[in-house]
């Protein structure tokens, strides 16, 4: 027997029906010993996530409005889940404690974390598992920075006392006991930390999709599933927006060489996607996946003999830093350098940025293009196959897509191209059809 850590997302614990599915999944495999849960998500399209309702309570408190009617909606939902599940818990006592804390000075982290806390109480009762509160176990310093060593030590010691346990996701606490949350979706991180703490054989992350697909199904109808993917490939695709898993959830398990299995609560027999350090032994496709994002801007600087001007690029990056703007890519030539920026990050700073560039770098000319989409084609097998670039760019040529930028990483497992926003979907479909049989 081994140890599996399983995490269930908001859609998986949205109501009593979903929690019954969770129970069946757990009972189907005795190795599933540690369970991490999110707060209940939407039950239907127009429904509200519990976390959003809790943030709304906080907003009411901050604006001197009574949050009680919103909190009543939350309370009724948990009580109905308890009733429909046929279990008896201390949920009323927990709800009353939270209600009494809804007053000026209550932190958003505390309020938001209660969704997972209450769901953990219910799930533990349904499964007959121990309930373990992560406050005091998942540690942050007084500035809210995560403390990995303290967390691993405390979490390992506590979970060793429990053969089977339910742990609420999303939060821990600072060293003085104040509740501190991760960013939204942080229950994925909790699951990863628990897996590392108990030295799990695998970390199963259950959600409402059956793993990753090779392309966005809204663009490529019938896109094939990805059975196996490496952590490095996942990092590249996630950066470009193909995300089923919180980005920071990868690092703890990767350090311990623990695979992640993305599964679907509503299709428990589907094997999903396995994420590990080891590439698949046989892969019928040269590429692993394609992902992209729209709405980037490109600022291109031209200056004669730029290559001989020591510190030119450093000064350009300093200008970006001073304006608080991160860059995405930095393609260069002998007398040119282009900086690619997210238009969201750029905001209304473009004019100030251009003035700083003119003043400090004195380029011969500057061009700005604000209608760029980036597309990443990713696969560890690309490095061993000749003709990948020819096939990729040939497919784009045949589809009438103009490529405005090319950037290949030093790992040689990804090729990033820039196209017009209007050609985004056409380009992804063309690349997919060229490589996927």
Image (cartoon, rainbow, N blue to C red):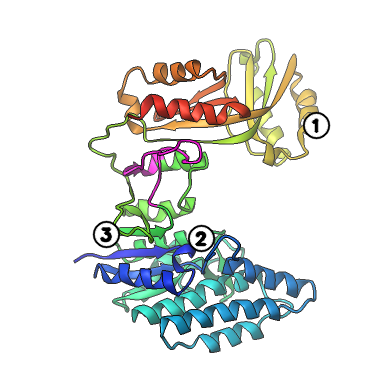
Q: Earlier in the sequence, mark 3 or mark 1?
A: 3
Residue 183 screen position, x and y as percent: 56, 59
For label 3, the SS is loop
Write down the residue under mark 3.
201
Residue 194 screen position, x and y as percent: 38, 65
Extreme residue toward the left, this view:
1
Write down the residue under mark 2.
186
For label 1, the SS is helix
Q: Earlier in the sequence, mark 1 or mark 2?
A: 2
Q: Which residues are magenta?
A: 210-233
Write down the residue under mark 1.
351
Extreme residue toward the top, this view:
304
Q: Are marks 1 and 2 in contact (CB under 8 Å)?
A: no
Estimate the spatial distance between the alpha carbons at disc 3 and disc 2, rounded to whole Å: 21 Å
Please state which of residues 408 and 185 is positioned toward the viewer in this rendering: 185
Residue at (44% x, 37% y) in the render: 221
Q: Is residue 84 above or below residue 399?
A: below
Drawn side of residue 42 relative to residue 353, left or right: left
Please state which of residues 274 and 326 is positioned toward the viewer in this rendering: 274
Report the quarter where the C terminus lies: top left
Q: Is residue 250 above or below residue 14?
A: above
Estimate the spatial distance between the alpha carbons at disc 1 and disc 2, rounded to whole Å: 36 Å
């Amino acid at each position: 027997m081994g140890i599996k850590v399983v995490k269930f997302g908001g859609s998986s614990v949205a109501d009593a029906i979903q929690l019954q599915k969770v129970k069946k999944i757990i009972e189907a495999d005795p190795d599933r010993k540690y369970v991490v849960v999110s707060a209940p998500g939407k039950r239907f399209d127009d429904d509200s996530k519990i976390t959003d309702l809790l943030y709304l309570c906080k907003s009411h408190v901050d604006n001197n409005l009574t949050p009680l009617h919103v909190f009543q909606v939350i309370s009724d939902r948990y009580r109905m889940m308890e009733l429909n599940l046929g279990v008896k818990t201390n949920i009323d006592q927990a709800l009353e404690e939270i209600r009494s804390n809804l007053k000026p000075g209550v932190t958003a982290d505390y309020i938001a974390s209660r969704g997972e806390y209450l769901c953990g109480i219910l799930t533990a009762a349904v499964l007959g598992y121990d309930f373990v509160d992560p406050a005091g176990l998942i540690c942050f310093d007084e500035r809210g920075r995560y403390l990995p060593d303290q967390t691993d030590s405390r979490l390992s010691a506590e979970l060793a006392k429990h053969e089977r346990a339910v742990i609420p996701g999303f939060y821990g606490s600072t060293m003085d006991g104040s509740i501190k949350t991760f960013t939204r979706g942080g229950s994925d991180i909790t699951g990863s930390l628990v897996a590392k703490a108990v030295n799990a054989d695998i970390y199963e992350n259950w959600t409402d999709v059956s793993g990753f697909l090779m392309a966005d199904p809204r663009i490529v109808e019938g896109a094939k599933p990805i059975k196996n993917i490496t952590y490095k490939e996942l990092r590249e695709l996630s950066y470009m927006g193909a995300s089923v898993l919180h980005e920071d959830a990868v690092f703890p398990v990767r350090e311990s060489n623990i695979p992640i299995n993305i599964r679907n609560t509503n299709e428990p027999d589907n094997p999903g996607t396995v994420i590990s350090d080891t590439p698949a032994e046989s892969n019928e496709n040269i590429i692993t996946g394609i992902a992209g994002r729209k709405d980037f801007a490109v600022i291109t600087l031209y200056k004669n003999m730029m290559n001989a001007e020591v510190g030119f690029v450093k000064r350009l990056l300093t200008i970006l830093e001073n304006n608080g703007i991160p860059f995405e890519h930095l393609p260069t030539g002998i007398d040119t350098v282009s900086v690619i920026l997210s238009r969201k990050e750029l905001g209304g700073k473009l004019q100030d940025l251009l003035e700083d560039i003119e003043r400090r770098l004195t380029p011969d000319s500057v061009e700005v293009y604000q209608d760029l989409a980036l597309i990443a084609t990713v696969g560890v097998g690309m490095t061993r196959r000749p003709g990948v670039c020819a096939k990729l760019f040939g497919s784009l040529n045949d589809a009438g897509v103009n490529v405005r930028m090319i950037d290949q990483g030093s790992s040689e497992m990804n090729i990033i191209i820039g196209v017009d926003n209007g050609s985004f979907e056409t380009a992804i479909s063309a690349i997919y059809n060229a490589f996927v049989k």
